[in-house]
Image (spheres, rainbow, N blue to C red):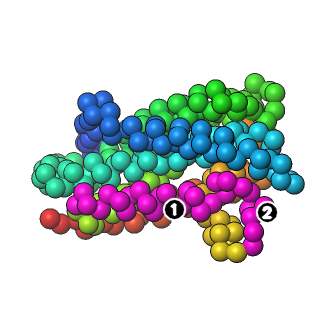
Amino acid sequence: MIEQRMSLRAVVAGIAKRNLLATIRMPSIIAPSLIFPIFILISFTSGFTALTDLPNFPTDNFTSWYLPFAALQGSSFAGAGAGFSAARDIENGFFDRLLLSPGRRVGILLGGLSVGFVRSTITALVVIATGFALGARPAVDDPLQVLGGLAVIILGAWAVATMAGLWSLGVAYRLKTERAAPLFFIVVFMALFLSTAQVPIDLMNSGWLQAIARWNPITYLLRFVRQGFVTPFSWADTWPGVVTVTAVLGLLFLWTWRALARYEK
């Protein structure tokens, strides 16, 4: 049993180290997850500040409202990079060598996901710093609330990076080609923007977007990560996000693991 656990750790650490070194050697891997969220943060906070004048908008600081979403958006791209790395390894034959190694296949999956935590943390911190420079401020002038607000954004970044990583890996294991890369990002992109990215559900016009946003798991994750910057912390905004994210991660893990367990060249 001890040998299995050591073998699993070795596989995870080895793949994570390889992917991390690839990120360092090729900054272009992480560049989109940094550039795009900063671009939309600057663009949206410059052009949509009047939204805070709407009745019942939860804050008078649109930068504070949009900052958590921008951090999640960038982190999702950081996580989806796991699928691109796996697809590249499948095409160049390295993935087949991994499968022949004496480690457990779950280690290959966890190793592919693990570097997403590093990439998403960097992305979230850069976006947070940019948001503060643009005028984002905590909802309550309390050091604990400020630290809590920063912590939940980081946790949200890890969660969405893991979701995107599982989704992209599941697609890569099934389609086995880098040409599937657009699927990694477009599905994640749609999930993010068909939520309460711009305005709360109550301020949306009744219709298909409101209906989708109401059932979109990202909506509940955004409620969770906006605590501290948009609203004070409350259990009512915490538990739906935690439960929803846990359920989605569980389903995505099973979906991805099924593809890897049945993987054949």
Per the picture, the main secondary structure of the magenta-coloured stretch is helix
- Residue ranking furthest to the bottom: 207
Q: Residue at x 19, y 55 (%)?
A: 90
Q: In the shown orientation, is residue 62 left or right of residue 248?
A: right
Cα distance between the residues tagged 2 and 1: 20 Å
**In front: 265, or 203?**
203
Judged from the image, the secondary structure of the residue bearing numbered disc 1 is helix
Is residue 118 visible to the viewer in this orientation of the structure? Answer: yes
Q: Residue at x 12, y 53 (%)?
A: 93
The numbered mark, 2 or 1, whose residue comes first in the sequence reads 1
Q: Residues within 10 Å of mark 2 (few under 14, many from 20)?
A: few
The amino acid at mark 1 is: Met
In terms of image quadrants, where is residue 60?
top right
Coordinates of residue 244 in the picture (x, y in percent): 61, 59
Provide the residue designation for mark 2.
202
Is residue 58 visible to the viewer in this orientation of the structure? Answer: no
Provide the residue designation for mark 1.
190
Asked if 178 appears above or below 120 in the picture, the reply is below
The amino acid at mark 2 is: Asp
The disc placed on residue 168 is none
Q: Residues within 10 Å of mark 1 (few under 14, many from 20)?
A: few
Q: Residue at x 51, y 62 (%)?
A: 190
Asked if 83 appears above or below 173 in the picture, the reply is above
Tell me the magenta residue range. Answer: 177-206
Q: In the shown orientation, is residue 189 left or right of residue 258?
A: right
Q: Residue at x 74, y 31 (%)?
A: 137
Judged from the image, the secondary structure of the residue bearing numbered disc 2 is helix
